[in-house]
Amino acid sequence: MAASKPKILITRRLPESIEARMAMLFETDVNEADAALTSDDILHGLAGKDVLVSTITDRIDADLIGRLPPSVRLIAQFGNGVDNIDLEAAWAAGLTVTNTPSVLTEDTADMAMALILALPRRLVEGTQMLLEDRAWAGWSPTSMLGHRLRGKALGIVGMGRIGTAVAQRARAFGLNIHYFSRSQRPLAVETPLAATYWDDLDAMLAEVDIVSLHTPLTRATRHILSAERLDRMKPGAYVINVSRPELLDEEALIDRLEQDRLFGAALDVFENRPGINPRLLALAESNHVVLTAHMASATMEARIEMGETVIVNIRTFMDGHQPPHRLLPEAPTPRAART
């Protein structure tokens, strides 16, 4: 008799090709409505299931983890970020958690570079001006003046895969590369980029014109760009965030933009709240901020690679092996056995 297929719950719609491949390999239950599920919806859908295929819109906290059916042994996150999952509670409950790292590097770096270009050259503002003023008078020597990128200093916070990819793109545009990271990168990385390493983030912030955030979110990096650090930046500097909203003190950033202490910001992520902060939207309307709809990884290629990585994690786990993208909490506690 053939072994039964693993039973999985997929909480959001995935690319058609990925859903079709999962349906061949697993017994799948997909949230056809493609809206964020409540905790009770997730629990109901997981009855008799082996695997939860989650996304960043699912809040998998300690309370939910404590109520999961005993059949569930794996949470396979469709995405790199796992801020929505209580990793410590999952570990303590004997659950394995995986994610999909590496596949988002190029797309996220492209988006960061696009925003680095958009801010000083006022690209969004120029587009909106034409749409709003159908009787545009045409070119003027003093119209829509922005700032040149070449020769400006870019400060990258977190020089991992994505930070390095951003540095490579930025260097091609003539930006001077500075970075702060947990450790200095090898000369093989630094030399082609002419990159300057700073072991003091405060000191780097005072010297650069653009700050781009690419560090993972941990207890130590939450609000790494705090109110105090925003005050250390040059007057007229820019902030870019395509990483995690919690890396940035959003309220403090808004205050400083409203006071014209910074030139602008470009954000692809925002603090969790019902909707976007109205003050932030007002700043976007006045062209102090560029806002994009969490689009950094939104390419068909990335989504398909993410899905394939989820499949690899599930198959490896269900075959009795450690999945390649297993995650551990920052400080593991004794864990329970889950059978």
Image (spheres, rainbow, N blue to C red):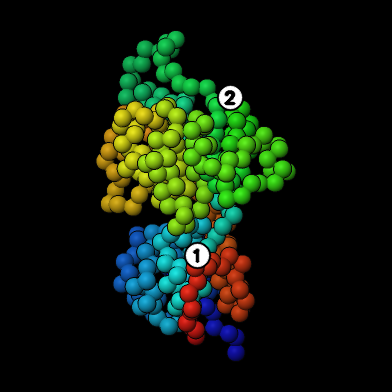
- Specify the quadrant of the image occupied by residue 109: top right
Q: Secondary structure at mark 2?
A: loop
The answer to whether residue 41 is left or right of residue 27 is left
Res. 12 visible in picture: no
Inspect the image, locate mark 1, and give the three-letter code of the amino acid beneath it.
Glu
Q: Quadrant of the N terminus?
A: bottom right
Circle 1 Cα neighbour tier, 10 Å, few/some/many (<14 / 14–19 / ≥20): few
Q: Disc 2 designates what residue?
A: 151
- Residue sitting at x 27%, y 52%: 274
- Specify the quadrant of the image occupied by residue 281: top left
- Residue sitting at x 64%, y 37%: 195
Q: In front: 201, or 143?
A: 201
Q: In front: 108, or 85?
A: 85
Residue 31 rendering spot, x and y as whole percentages: 39, 66
Q: Which mark is residue 105?
A: none
Q: Disc 1 designates what residue?
A: 330
Compare marks 1 and 2 and give the one earlier in the sequence.
Answer: 2
For marks 1 and 2, give the one nearer the viewer: 1
In this view, the residue farthest toward the right is 188
Q: Please, is residue 78 above or below residue 44 in the view? A: above
Residue 28 rendering spot, x and y as whole percentages: 47, 72
- Residue sitting at x 39%, y 30%: 262
Residue 309 rendering spot, x and y as whole percentages: 58, 62
Q: Please, is residue 56 above or below residue 287 in the view? A: below
